[in-house]
Image (tube, coloured by chain):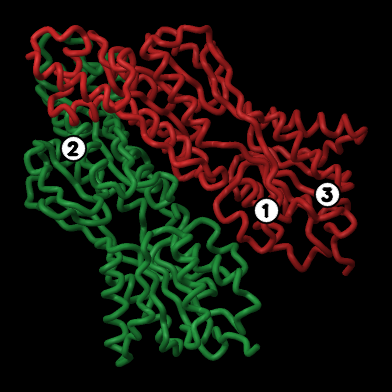
Chain colours: A red, B green
Amino acid sequence: MSETFPTKPEVPRPTMIDVARRAGVGLGTVSRVVNGGHGVRDETAQRVRAAIDELGFQRNEVARALRPGKKSTSLALVLGDLTNPFYATIAKASLEIAGQSGFAVVLGSVDEDPEGEKRAIQELVSRQVAGLMIVPDQGDHAFLEGAGVPVVFVDRPATGIDADIVMVDNEGGGRLATEHLLAQGHERIAIILAPSYYTIGRRLRGFRRAHRAAGIDVDESLVIQLPEGNAEAAEKATHEVMLRPDPPTAIFASTNFLTEGVLRALGELGSELESEPAVVGFDDFRLADMLPTPVTVVASDIAELGRSAARLLLDRASGADTRPPQRIVLPCGLIKRGSGERPPDSAAKRKPR
Amino acid sequence: MSETFPTKPEVPRPTMIDVARRAGVGLGTVSRVVNGGHGVRDETAQRVRAAIDELGFQRNEVARALRPGKKSTSLALVLGDLTNPFYATIAKASLEIAGQSGFAVVLGSVDEDPEGEKRAIQELVSRQVAGLMIVPDQGDHAFLEGAGVPVVFVDRPATGIDADIVMVDNEGGGRLATEHLLAQGHERIAIILAPSYYTIGRRLRGFRRAHRAAGIDVDESLVIQLPEGNAEAAEKATHEVMLRPDPPTAIFASTNFLTEGVLRALGELGSELESEPAVVGFDDFRLADMLPTPVTVVASDIAELGRSAARLLLDRASGADTRPPQRIVLPCGLIKRGSGERPPDSAAKRKPR
């Protein structure tokens, strides 16, 4: 996924540590120099200032990061299953940004367990982190109001609290995928949905809006709500819907793992179908281009989700950003690879027996 | 990868937090009760003791975790690119184990940058973590000797320091892959190697030993050392070796990303080759079974690497394990899926033009 949006290799911004190393002093000395230079020898202070200038630092940036009384240089990141590349990409990107400002990241990984998530968050708050990035589970997050640290939600908003949120345009992405299938003449499009996360609801809304705009009714029996959000559940549901007398000619899978399950089912059904339905997935995934039919996806820059969240949180933690809660929405794009470009006339029909 | 070795869902061990919640008190109160009960009302102490008994805790386990003077309940984990599922799996597993004992994990992710790694480690040590888990980069780690915290290395040992190491049987895995190909009659097997990590060297040693045991000479021109350890480098090298007048009939790719590169090249070459060479990869990866030819791999339980390392480190940090440095080696197994079972007579020859 990280490879989908190649970006220029960023020159890492220098950190406090670079300044200290360059000047051959400790972090504390850098701090004292920036905050007035009390108790630092002139020669040493001179060296620190030279290092700051050479590294192209903004003086106030240093001052902010080293403000006296600042308690913590750790951020916390709470998110789901790290072996899901979606979460791993967010973690990697936010670590990079935090590290550039000399912040460490404490990680809490909790998978679909609101109680566990609450406990993990309280644990992290008690460790006096400077701020929290949270990919929130369902459930009320009002308990965070009194936590006394800035919070940035990632990928989806939380209920019960008004805070910054960085997310992708789920509704736009859902609409884009559906419009692409409709434009090729598909009128029976199934949508496979993970349990009711906010993001999935928005993707479904985009699916419905695209149908409405095209003047085509949604067959509600093709709106398939899974009991669980994993590949196995999607595989089973795809089996069932494709073996109905009136199967869809296209499938929109609403997450990367669901796309995998849909493709598994179609691979197994293979010879039982006259031809395969078109498939579009939400979120890109590694090897999507190497499968027997390369997979068309709607995708966004997941690494940028993590970077934006970390930047915003650092600015909140330092006091540099005092705006009311922001809502940052990243766009989705369509990556055509083949599976989403099958026309309906060649698409799935069950072979007569 | 996490799906390769299904394990029984573990019942999570109760944590200090569970005891505190059950008794309706704070962690500090649990600590005071366990350490003698000074300043705690009898009734409250009674409740805490009941909670400990009900949750099946060993009293000394609680005492150890709450030992007075204990400074930190954080572990640090330093590893490579989190979007490599290999590292993500280690991170996830160690987080789970740490969390069960009430420990948080601070993450440092550094990719092939020994200086950056050193800086990240020093940063983390200065945060007074209770211990370090490190997937070490190349370069001397002697600077850790004086760090004053226990260190467990994961996946590969570090030079310059004698510490615990949890790893997989790289040599055994390399031998297993090679023996599998030799047993099918392959005598020209290429091995694609990432730059000289310890693990890769061991896998190569296994490759050589298997040849020696079979009485077959290794063609040194088929021992291919890549300049970089990514899929692109492996793709390029595979192109080159397969278009030689004397191409190999089998390829052993020494990491998951290299396997991807080999398969990409073979896919592109497709019609230029009379048939494809056999391919065995080291380490399993998601979707390996869904590629046009499902991929045979040598694999080990990567999650168990992370779990073992975290368990060992917690025992070192608590003082429960005072043995000399240990070396824990997990076995590798072969997962046959098709790509590694192509016989040499049907294997790659360049089509006559």
In the rendered image, which quarter contains the N terminus of chain B?
bottom left
Q: Is residue A348 left or right of residue B64?
A: right
* Kind of element beneath mark 3: loop
Where does label 1 land, which residue?
A295
Where does label 3 land, which residue?
A248
Residue depicted at x 13% and y 29%: A24
In the image, what residue type sits under mark 3?
Pro
Between the residue at mark 2 and the residue at mark 3, the CA separation in whole angstroms equals 55 Å
Residue A35 at what x, y percent from top left? 21, 9
Q: Is residue B165 left or right of residue A200?
A: left
Residue A177 at what x, y percent from top left? 75, 40
Q: Is residue B344 above or below residue B139?
A: below
Q: Nearer the viewer, residue A161 or B350?
A: B350
Residue A122 at what x, y percent from top left? 36, 19
Q: Badge 1 sits on which subunit? A: A
Quadrant housing residue B65: top left
Between the residue at mark 1 and the residue at mark 2, the CA separation in whole angstroms equals 43 Å
* Kind of element beneath mark 1: loop
Quadrant housing residue B251: bottom left
Residue depicted at x 64% and y 39%: A227
Where does label 2 land, which residue?
B131
Quadrant housing residue A17: top left
In the rendered image, which quarter contains the C terminus of chain B?
bottom right
Residue depicted at x 60% and y 40%: A229
Closer to the eye: label 1 or 2: 1
Q: Badge 2 sits on which subunit? A: B
Between the residue at mark 3 and the residue at mark 1, the CA separation in whole angstroms equals 18 Å
